[in-house]
Image (cartoon, rainbow, N blue to C red):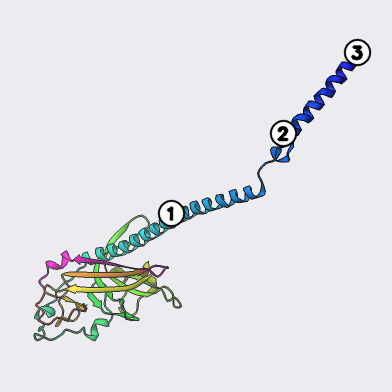
């Protein structure tokens, strides 16, 4: 009896289940138990890819801007350090007026002074020299300047001593095959006994100060006008040293971008010297 009741209840349960499935066919549909479709996943991945691309672009631009700013800051710091070093050497310049210079005859008014050929001869570092010459490379100014100044000379392993010498700033290629130019500083000490040749720099005494230099222009103030050249060995046309020097430095980086730096240097050590009056002055370049 009990067994028949269980069978009857099982039959009734199956009939009720079949009736509910018949009345609600979505309950037995595979869609009710499945995940995302392939189309939905594809659209989601496409949207995610667009969002990630935008985020990466923003980060890439930020990183590129940061690297550009750091590179420009490094270039500015190197150029300003080179100008500061030239400024220090020029401000420490020493010049004396010989008796022959004081008695030399000045040129007639209106005559443009021209440095003598003797200005290119070798000189000893203990002789007062202030030489500035116009040089060009492919139409760009690459002037050089040589002055007698106070320099620091390493005399021992633990200390450095001051010495009178000639400091020569010039522009030359980084290597014989390289088209890139650099600013060099040549130092000839008086205690070394060597002679200074402005037309032939000594590689052993020259140090690269700044690479990527594409222009170097000097102008000299004689008290009334700015002139393009100076030669203290030419006593008839130039005095011992100018009162001020204007420096224009042009630097080109690896990307081909050029930056121009300018400064004017006052020579306080020269103002105490009574320079002979120079009547003629060269016409300024600009």
Mark 1 — residue? Answer: 62
x and y percent of residue 130 in the render?
22, 74
Location of residue 186 (image quadrant):
bottom left
Q: First in sequence: mark 2 or mark 1? A: 2
Determine the CA span between mark 1 and mark 3.
85 Å
Q: Secondary structure at mark 1?
A: helix
x and y percent of residue 206 in the render?
36, 70
Q: First in sequence: mark 1 or mark 3? A: 3
Examine the structure image and report whether residue 255 is included in the region drawn in magenta: yes
Determine crowd level at label 3: few under 14, some 14-19, many 20+ residues with C-alpha closer than 10 A: few
Q: Secondary structure at mark 2?
A: loop
Query: Mark 1 and mark 2 in contact (Cβ < 8 Å)?
Result: no
Q: Secondary structure at mark 3?
A: loop
Determine crowd level at label 1: few under 14, some 14-19, many 20+ residues with C-alpha closer than 10 A: few
Determine crowd level at label 2: few under 14, some 14-19, many 20+ residues with C-alpha closer than 10 A: few
Determine the CA span between mark 3 and mark 2.
35 Å
Determine the CA span between mark 2 and mark 1.
58 Å
Mark 2 — residue? Answer: 24
Q: Does any portion of residue 120 appear in the rendered image?
A: yes
Examine the structure image and report whether residue 31 is included in the region drawn in magenta: no
The range drawn in magenta is: 252-274
Q: Which mark is residue 1?
A: 3
Q: In the depicted view, which residue is nearer to us: 30 or 262?
A: 30
Q: Nearer the viewer, mark 2 or mark 1?
A: 2
Q: In the depicted view, which residue is nearer to us: 95 or 282?
A: 282
């Amino acid at each position: 009896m009990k067994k028949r009741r269980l069978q009857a209840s099982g039959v009734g349960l199956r009939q009720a289940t079949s009736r509910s499935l018949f009345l609600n066919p979505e309950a037995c549909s595979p869609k009710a138990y499945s995940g995302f479709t392939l189309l939905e996943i594809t659209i989601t991945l496409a949207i995610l890819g667009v969002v990630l691309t935008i985020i990466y672009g923003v980060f890439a631009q930020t990183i590129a801007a940061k690297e550009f700013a750091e590179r420009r800051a490094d270039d500015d710091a190197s150029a300003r350090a080179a100008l500061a070093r030239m400024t220090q050497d020029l401000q420490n310049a020493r010049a004396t007026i010989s008796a022959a210079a004081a008695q030399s005859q000045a040129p007639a008014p209106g005559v443009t002074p021209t440095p003598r050929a003797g200005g290119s001869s070798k000189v000893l570092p203990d002789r007062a020299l202030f030489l500035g010459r116009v040089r060009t490379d492919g139409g760009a100014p690459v002037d050089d300047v040589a002055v007698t100044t106070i320099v620091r000379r390493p005399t021992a392993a633990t200390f450095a001593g001051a010495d009178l010498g000639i400091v020569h700033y010039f522009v030359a290629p980084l290597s014989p095959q390289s088209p890139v130019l650099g600013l060099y500083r040549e130092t000839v000490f008086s205690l070394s006994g060597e002679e200074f040749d402005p037309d032939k720099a000594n590689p052993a005494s020259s140090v690269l100060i700044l690479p990527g230099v594409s222009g170097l222009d000097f102008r000299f103030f004689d008290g009334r006008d700015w002139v393009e050249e100076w030669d203290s060995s030419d006593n008839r046309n130039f005095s011992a040293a100018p009162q001020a020097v204007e420096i224009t430095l042009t630097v080109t980086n690896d990307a081909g971008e050029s930056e121009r730096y300018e400064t004017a240097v006052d020579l306080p050590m020269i103002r105490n010297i009574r320079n002979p009056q120079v009547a003629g002055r060269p016409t300024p370049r600009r």
